[in-house]
Structures are given as structure tokens and as C-alpha cells.
Amino acid sequence: MEQKLKTELYITPDLQQSLDILTLGVTDLASYVNNVALDNPAIRVDPPTWQMSASFARRPHKKNRQPLDEKTPDPVMALKAPEPTLADRLKAALPTYQLDTELLKGTHLIIDALDERGYLGMPLEEISQRFNYPMDRLKKALEVVQSLDPPGIGARDLRECLHLQHRRLGEPLPVLTAIIEEHLLDVAKGQFKKIASRLRVSLEAVLEAVSLLKTFHPKPGKLYSTDSEPTVYIIPDAAVQNNTGTLEVRIYDDVLPRLTLEPDILQMLRHEKLDTQTKAYLARQVARANKLIEQLNARKTTLARVLHAVAHYQKDFFFYGFDHLKPLTMQTVAETVGLSVSTVSRAVRDKYIQTPWGVIEFKRLFPSAISGTEAQGEATSETVIRKIKAYIEAEDKTQPLSDEEIAAALNREGIYISRRTVAKYRSLSGIPSSQQRKHNKKAPENPFRKEIEPVYRH
């Protein structure tokens, strides 16, 4: 008989509950807490400090939630609106890219071919042939669609979907990249030691990568799916307000039920003569109640730490508006507050923040940096595209600006970007080269521009 020492790591029920509590938005969390309390006689539930009106009292259905009106200062007032489809949301975001007519047509072809998961359900070759659309332009259109929210949209399979979401977080983790590419089945089977052995990394590195992987959505299109259920409302999880030049962070936990230990149960444990089995049962319930209260407090603390860090990095946004958003990754925030990237990701996921400019998704405060920069800059891709467009519109049409000249102009503004990156964003926006502009004289009008309104105006 041969003895082998085997080490296995697993998530305990308490840890799983803690992760669930951190991930849930405030409205879903209120429902979750009420359901847990129903099964635990040791929990006393008092109404939240803020009383919901009848329209807010029902448990919200996650897929049908509507954000609050961005101009509404009261965090609990909302304006009901029809639920847009996934295609509506994606097409409404396109005007910020300032695409030409043909490239915009290509993005519409891609969006219309997405299935309910948000995946591209038709090969590019088939779309190109069916609609007589150039293949090279269709590939650029796919790049545009895959840059839209939610991350993962426009993927052609699960691996690409996960890779797209991974890249949105900033610098990709090599371990997670390898797991997505080669070991998804091993993850499903829980064979983490096998993955560590194959990749020649520590087990802790694999578990950290898998924890982050579990925050990704395998079917991003489902986040915006519509059905026959009634529309309900979103209440922000927190607020960052400008109080006479000082940013103040507030966590809206007053919309949650107030939990305490049930006095009658504590009285019974202290003074009643109970049989051993009953006493053990009540003691377990008291311990679980204490654990739940502790986890709710930990959620509030974690959310506050993350939001304080984000408010520090994005202070110009809170003072001056959307044009002053800076590139920010969850890795940066994680290192600042001393948490793992997966914990920050859970703290951000499904959360809404009230700002001086309206209620927005928390993840919107993590815009990606422009690609291909040689130095650390503060411009997002949207800002760069807008500036490139402005330079080209103001140029001498008889002597159009080259990509190198545009790059030099952006460098002087503090946006350190290469000629090749300018060419990429110019091409992605459907703007002709300087030689083509010199001959064409005038860029084509975009007939879709007046028909599509952006989701956010800023």
C-alpha cells in the first residue's frame, strides 16, 4: 500500500457567500439578504432607513433594470423608459467613433448578425459575400464592434469572448491568457494542479487567474436581452459628490434591510433549558447571522476603498465632466488599495455610481488607454479619434496633414502616440489617407449621423 499526500483547495460556503455579496448590486443584494434571513431565525430584519416606494418594492429583475436619469440629483428617483435591445445599444454608441458611411454600414452588418449571446453567428466571409461588402473593411468594422460595451461583444467563440474581456482590464495576465487558450476544460473540471503543472507556475497563480476568469461573462449579449417582464429601476450603490471642491464618497447601504441578532434567540441561548440538539442548532444560526453581518460590513468597506481610489484617479472627471476621464485599469486600483484584481472586479461588477453628471455604471470609470502609445498618456481612444478628426477638418485641403504630422501635433498636446497608431485610429474611423484626401477634397457625409443618438452625451 502506497500513501500519497494530496492537497486540494476549494471554496468554502462562507467564502462563496462573501464573494456573492461583494458581486451583487444593491437592489439584488437587498433581495438576497431578505431570502437568507427567511431561513435563519437568529436574524432580525428591520426596514431600511430609506423606504422604497411601491414602484421600487418589488424584487428587481436584473436583465430589465433601467438606470436612473443622469440629470436626476435624487439617487432614488428614476425615469422609466422602454428597454432598448442589444442592437439598439450598440448602434447608439457608434456616433462617438465618427465613422464614414461605408464603415458604419459594415458595423451595422456585424451588429445585425450577432446572436442573443452577443456572438457573431455568421462567418465574415458569408457576410461579405451576401451583402457584397469588402472583406478588409468588414474586419475593421468587427474591430469597432468588439471595442463596444459590454466587453466580449462581437466574439466568434467563447475563447475570443474571454480574451476580449481580459484585454479590457489592462495588461493581460500571461497565466490567464494561457488558461483561456488551452485549459478551459481543465478549469471546468477543477483540475487546477494540472494547469499549474502544465504551465509551470504556482498553484496560487492559477487560482488567482481562475478567480478573475470567473468574473467574465460568457454570454455578454445576455446582459442587454429583453423579454416580457416589466421594466424596473436601478438604485445606485454609491455616490461621489463634489462638496465645494472636496470629493465625498458615500455608500448607499441605507437602502438595505438592517440586520441584527434576534433578541429572543439570544435570550433562549442564555437562559432557557434547551436540549443539546436545539441549542447547537440555534448557536449555528447565530454564528451564521454574525457572519452575514460581518460580510455586509466587509462589502461596504471594500466598495468604499475601491471607490475612494477611483475617485482619486478620476478626480478631474468628477470636477469637470466626461471629457476628463483618464485611462484606468483595475490592476492599478488593485495595487493601490492592496486587493487582488478579481476582488476589485467583483466590487465594480453590476454596480452603479451617482456622480455630479448623473448615475453611471461603475465600470465606465475604467476607460481603456489608447493602444500603441510610447509613453504613459492620459487620453482614451475616443479622445484621440476626436482630436484626429478635428485636425483633419481644420487642415489645408490642398496640403492635407500626414499621419506623422498629426502624431507630432498630438505629442505637443501631451498625447504621446506614434504615426502608426494615428494611422490605425484614422483608418478605423474611416478617414482616408492624406493622399486620398488631397484628391477627394471632401470626406463623404454620414447619412446615419442624424438618425442615431448616442446613449450618453458628453
Image: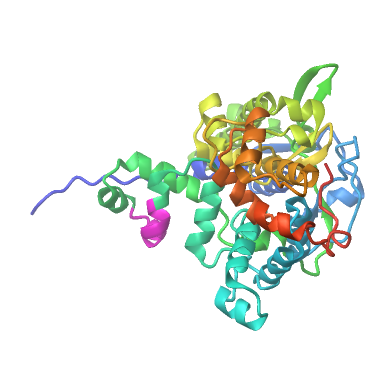
Can residue 413 be seen in this snapshot? yes
Q: In which quarter of the image is residue 220?
A: bottom right
Which quarter of the rendered picture does the N terminus lie within? bottom left
Q: In which quarter of the image is residue 410?
A: top right
Percent of width and height locating residue 231: 84, 59
Percent of width and height locating residue 334: 53, 31
- 210, 91: nearer the viewer: 91
- 373, 458: nearer the viewer: 373
Render colour scheme: rainbow
Numbered-mark total: 0
- 64, 417: nearer the viewer: 417
The span shown in magenta is: 178-191
432, above or below 313, in the image? below
Q: Residue at x 81, y 28 (%)?
A: 320
Percent of width and height locating residue 221: 66, 63
Can residue 265 be seen in this snapshot? no
Is residue 46 shown in magenta?
Answer: no
Q: Which residue is drawn at 80% across and 25% down?
A: 319
Percent of width and height locating residue 150: 66, 54
281 relative to 96 in the view: left or right? left
Q: Is the magenta stretch mostly helix, strand or loop?
A: helix
- 305, 124: nearer the viewer: 124
Find the residue positioned furthest to the front.
Answer: 398
Find the residue positioned furthest to the left.
Answer: 1
Which quarter of the rendered picture does the C terminus lie within? top right
Is residue 180 shown in magenta?
Answer: yes
Q: In which quarter of the image is residue 428?
A: bottom right
